[in-house]
Image: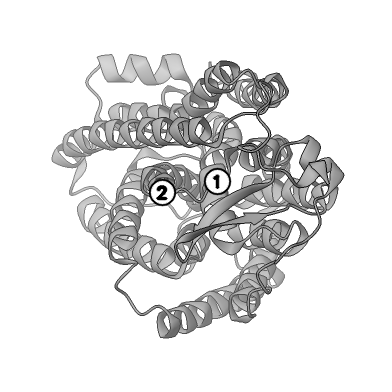
């Protein structure tokens, strides 16, 4: 039965080799970890500023008010970082965090294209479009 | 409670949730939202926003460690992410429209179901299943190292798995969790993917799924920096420590304890949801 053959025993230019899949995953894994560490560092920096100023105020999350627009949109966050606000910096770190898996998907497109796997390039483009639609269509841009 | 006390206590609780979640493989986010709402009286929407952010952090942070083991299947992951990201988008939009008491009830059922699933024995590892034509066309079949030899596997029932994954994504977007329980149902039970492959692949997918609803949550003001900061840092540190000590730890009794915690929290959420105390 030809369908039982492994990729190794049935060389086919359109069939991706397992090692390159694995190498792609290693690169993607490191990309993700770097992104998370970067965003965690920014969040910690923001936390220092925020806590040094507001440590003794009462904490209240009982009632949902929604965040002010400076913490809800990308331009708002950038603006509040420029104004030296700790919470703005935390929010910037969280934006980096959200961008990390999106970067992973974008990079996967390159990886699948290098493997000449056009079907998976297509799948990955669909996922990236959904992510970008969610991010930009939701009005945070 | 002052901001400083609140930050420290929430960070410690999040650290414990992240540690236990990664040691038991049941995920930290699923206990975090009920803990924040029940113990700290945080509004459900703020809790969901903070949890969602921490889910992205743990998934992405653990990915590098998982990838080195060589179990995850990037093709299965990417194909199913089409379903989970669409689902997450729908879930997030739905979350901003339905009342919080209904959200609490859905959350409660999810927790009870997760607790039940964690006590159920895993399905028998597949041996020599015939290749499925669709899975073969999608190049999903693969192999993984098992006791020193490479074992092949043939993925089954792709449409069922895809449909369940849409549900997993919707739940993730609705509740701000990784929804590992439904992913296990789809990948282990429907698609018959070997356990090691499905857990690592699902971890890879969780971050992307969560990112699909994060934009909606952020723009609706659900992500509070003062709350998300200790939650994200605590869960991340806890889960990273958990993946380090995973190999040495005896997780069987830990799993039992943690699933009882999940069950109790689930019943609490159901009670709060049905009696409108949330």
**Residue located 69% across and 56% down the image:** B187
Residue found 46% across the figure and 77% down from its top: B258
| Residue B269 on image: x %, y % | 60, 70
B172 lies above or below B14: above
Please identify the quadrant where the C terminus of chain B is shown.
bottom right
Tell which subunit mark 2 falls on: B
Mark-to-mark CA distance, 2 and 1: 9 Å
Q: Residues within 10 Å of mark 2 (few under 14, many from 20)?
A: many
Task: Tell me residue B57's x, y (percent).
Answer: 40, 43
Judge whether A22 appears above or below A99 on screen: below
Visible residue check, residue B276: no
Quarter of the rendering containing residue B247: bottom left
User: Could you tell me which chain the residue with mark 1 belongs to?
Assistant: B
Picture residue at 35% right of the left edge, 26% below the top: A92
Q: Identify which residue is drawn at 55% across, 46% down.
A: B206
Q: Which of A50 and B90 is in front in this view?
A: B90
Residue B7 at x, y percent in the picture: 26, 53
Mark 2 and mark 1 on one chain: yes
Query: On the rendered image, what quadrant is the N terminus of chain B found in?
Result: bottom left
Q: Is mark 2 on a helix, strand or loop?
A: helix
Q: How crowded is mark 1: few (under 14 residues within 10 Å), some or many (20 or more)?
A: many
Mark 2 lies on residue = B58
Q: Look at the picture and state if B83 lies above or below A115.
A: below
Give how far across and how far down residue B37 sits, in percent.
Answer: 49, 62
Residue A77: name its quadrant.
Answer: top left
In the image, farthest residue toward the left: A52
Is residue B108 shown left or right of residue B36? Answer: right
Colour scheme in use = one colour
- The first of marks 2 and 1 along the sequence is 2
Q: Which of A78 and B118 is in front in this view?
A: B118
Residue ID for mark 1: B206
**CB under 8 Å between callouts 2 and 1?**
yes
């Amino acid at each position: 039965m030809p369908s039982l053959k492994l990729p190794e025993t049935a060389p086919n230019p359109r069939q991706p080799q397992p090692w390159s899949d694995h190498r792609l995953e290693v690169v993607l894994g490191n990309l993700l970890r770097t992104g998370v560490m970067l965003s965690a560092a920014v969040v910690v920096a923001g936390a220092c500023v925020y806590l040094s100023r507001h440590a003794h105020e009462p904490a209240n999350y009982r009632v949902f008010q929604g965040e002010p627009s400076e913490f809800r949109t990308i331009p708002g966050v950038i603006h509040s970082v420029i104004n030296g606000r700790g919470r703005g910096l935390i929010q910037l770190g969280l934006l980096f965090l959200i961008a990390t898996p999106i970067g992973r998907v974008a990079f996967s497109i390159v990886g699948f294209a290098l493997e000449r796997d056009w079907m998976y390039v297509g799948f990955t483009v669909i996922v990236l479009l959904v992510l970008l639609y969610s991010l930009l269509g939701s009005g945070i841009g | 409670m002052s901001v400083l006390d609140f930050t420290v206590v929430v960070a410690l609780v999040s650290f414990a949730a992240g540690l236990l979640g990664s040691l038991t493989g049941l995920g930290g986010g699923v206990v975090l939202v009920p803990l924040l709402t029940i113990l700290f009286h945080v509004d459900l929407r703020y809790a969901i926003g903070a949890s969602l952010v921490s889910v992205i952090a743990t998934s992405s942070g653990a990915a590098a460690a998982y990838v080195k083991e060589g179990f995850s299947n990037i093709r299965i992951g990417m194909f199913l992410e089409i379903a989970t990201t669409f689902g997450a988008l729908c879930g997030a939009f739905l979350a901003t429209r339905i009342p919080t008491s209904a959200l609490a009830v859905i959350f409660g059922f999810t927790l009870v179901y997760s607790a039940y699933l964690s006590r159920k024995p895993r399905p028998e590892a597949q041996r020599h299943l015939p290749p499925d034509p669709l899975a073969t066309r999608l190049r999903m079949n693969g192999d993984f190292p098992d006791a020193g030899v490479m074992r092949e596997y043939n993925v089954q029932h792709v449409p069922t798995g895809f449909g369940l994954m849409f549900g997993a994504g919707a739940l993730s977007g609705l509740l701000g969790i990784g929804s590992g329980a439904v992913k296990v149902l789809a990948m282990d039970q429907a698609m018959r993917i070997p356990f090691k492959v499905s857990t690592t692949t699902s971890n890879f997918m969780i971050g992307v799924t969560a990112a699909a609803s994060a934009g909606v949550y952020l723009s609706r003001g659900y992500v509070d920096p003062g709350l998300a900061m200790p939650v994200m840092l605590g869960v991340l540190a806890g889960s990273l420590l958990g993946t380090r000590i995973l190999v040495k730890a005896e997780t069987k009794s830990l799993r039992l304890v943690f699933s009882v915690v999940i069950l109790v929290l689930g019943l609490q959420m159901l009670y709060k949801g049905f009696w409108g105390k949330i």
